[in-house]
Image (cartoon, rainbow, N blue to C red):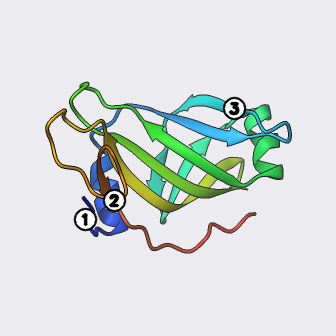
Amino acid sequence: MSIDVSLQRLTETLTRYHFAYLLTVGDNARVHVVAVHPALANDALLVGNPGQKTSANLAAHPLVTVVWPPTDPSDYSLIVDGIGSMRDGKLAITPTRAVLHRPAPPQGTTSPGCKSDCIELPIAAEPASSG
């Protein structure tokens, strides 16, 4: 299932979640995960003080993923892929893809490309500038 929405819809969706996990990748191809509280401002997710390991990974590999777990097991996780850059001491992530995701009900119908219950949240935004 896929539903076209704007970046404004992402802002509204974020209010349902309490915290997120930020995933970056290092030169050793290992994923580094930290709990964060991103805020959406000026078409970018902002994360204050991302930490040394996250900052080092970001410098080498700017593609990141942010995952908000559901507050209830029957609800959706929110997954946002993006391009990260440092801006005024904060990590700024320009969303490139967003999806609400949960396992499909045992007898539910799913979209052909996803074996789970997914709702695509298309994103149209410019990459965050570093500075």
Residue 70, percent across and down?
A: 31, 31
Give the alpha-carbon distance from disc 3 to disc 1, as whole Å.
30 Å
Q: Please, what is the three-letter code of the amino acid marked with disc 2?
A: Glu
Which residue position holds label 3? 32
Q: Quadrant of residue 47?
A: top right
Q: Quadrant of residue 28?
A: top right
Count how many numbered circles sit on residues in the image. 3
Residue visible at 28% across and 39% down in the picture: 76
Vertical side of 77 occupied by 42: above or below: below
Q: Which numbered tag is attached to residue 23? A: none
Residue visible at 78% across and 42% down in the picture: 57
Residue 94, percent across and down?
A: 56, 62
**Which comes sooner in the sequence, label 2 or label 3?**
3
Local crowd size for mark 2, using a 10 Å CA cut-off: few (<14), some (14–19), many (≥20)? some
- Per the image, label 1 sits on a secondary structure element best described as loop
- Per the image, label 3 sits on a secondary structure element best described as strand
Q: Please, what is the three-letter code of the amino acid marked with disc 3?
A: His
Which residue position holds label 1? 3
Vertical side of 83 occupied by 23: above or below: above
Left or right position of 20 against 101: right
**Which comes sooner in the sequence, label 3 or label 1?**
1
**Which comes sooner in the sequence, label 2 or label 1?**
1
Which residue position holds label 2? 120
Position of the N terminus, as image quadrant, is bottom left
Give the alpha-carbon distance from disc 2 to disc 3, as whole Å.
25 Å
Residue visible at 53% across and 54% down in the picture: 81
Position of the C terminus, as image quadrant, is bottom right
- Per the image, label 2 sits on a secondary structure element best described as strand
Residue 21, percent across and down?
A: 52, 33
Left or right position of 85 against 105: right
